[in-house]
Amino acid sequence: MGGAIFSAEQGYLVACIDGGSRGNPGPAGYGVVIEDEVGRPVAELNEYLGKQTNNYAEYSGLLAALSYAIKHGFKAMKIVSDSELMVRQINGQYKVSSPALKDLYTLAMKRIDELDYFEIKHVRREHNREADRLANLAMDRGLAKKAPVMTEVAGAARQEVSGVVVNGAVQFLADPLPDGTLVRIRPAK
């Protein structure tokens, strides 16, 4: 993956990722802990995803980590995950058969191809506690029905939501918006 020879002098990120759902499907979220190549904290990411499967949440965590690396100009990344299924799918050992995961897998592979070096490995759950803690915080926030992030733009409150295109239609990663909501879409880079 990522074909080029990797040099440690270039700098790289290590991301511990986790996704979970309470029920399968159920209220879901992901957590990501990102460090630099010497173990210094770089970022912590988490997001409530609404009602999704555990595997959907795992892929969402992977996509968040990859997006962070690309957005911040990193060309090398190591991922640590306790999802054996996802790790084996990304490494080409298992086929992705779930239609809901195929689009996420395809998007992940596109982002991986943007890197010069990529590695993903499986660890046992007890070696991924911080990412698990962040995923649970996201689910707790969602279950507490905290208000979504709102920003004031030109006097009108606007809600920011995330989504992914599946079969040509946007599927929101959190709770759906009410009917009649005006939506303006800007593709993420």
Image (cartoon, rainbow, N blue to C red):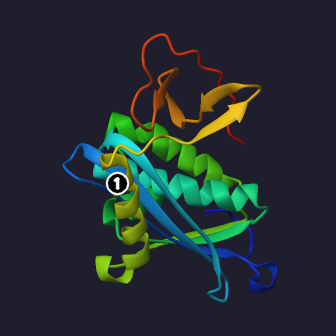
Q: Quadrant of the N terminus?
A: bottom right
Give the residue at x 31% y 82%.
Answer: 126
Q: Which residue is mark 1?
A: 139
Judge whether 33 appears above or below 25 on screen: below
Please identify the residue farthest to the top as the structure is shown.
Answer: 180
| Residue 111 at least partly seen | yes
Give the residue at x 46% y 50%.
Answer: 60
Instruction: Indicate the position of residue 68 as horizontal and vertical percent values.
Output: 66, 58
Instruction: Indicate the position of residue 174 as horizontal and vertical percent values.
Output: 42, 38
Please identify the residue farthest to the front as the structure is shown.
Answer: 155
The total number of labels drawn is 1
Give the residue at x 47% y 37%.
Answer: 103
* In-image side of 51 versus 91 (left or right): left
* In-image side of 52 versus 177 (left or right): left
Q: Return the residue nearer the eye: 74 or 131.
A: 131
In which quarter of the view is residue 87 placed? bottom left
Q: Quadrant of the C terminus?
A: top right
Judge whether 72 appears above or below 105 on screen: below
Instruction: Indicate the position of residue 86 as horizontal and vertical percent values.
Output: 38, 58
How many neighbours does mark 1 have within 10 angstroms: few (below 14), some (14-19), or many (20 or more)?
many
Please identify the residue farthest to the bottom as the structure is shown.
Answer: 38
Instruction: Indicate the position of residue 133 as horizontal and vertical percent values.
Output: 38, 70
* In-image side of 34 versus 49 (left or right): right
Q: Return the residue nearer the eye: 139 or 172.
A: 139
Q: Return the residue nearer the eye: 14 or 176.
A: 176
- The secondary structure type at the circle numbered 1 is helix
| Residue 92 at least partly seen | no
Identify the amino acid type marked 1: Met
* In-image side of 82 versus 67 (left or right): left
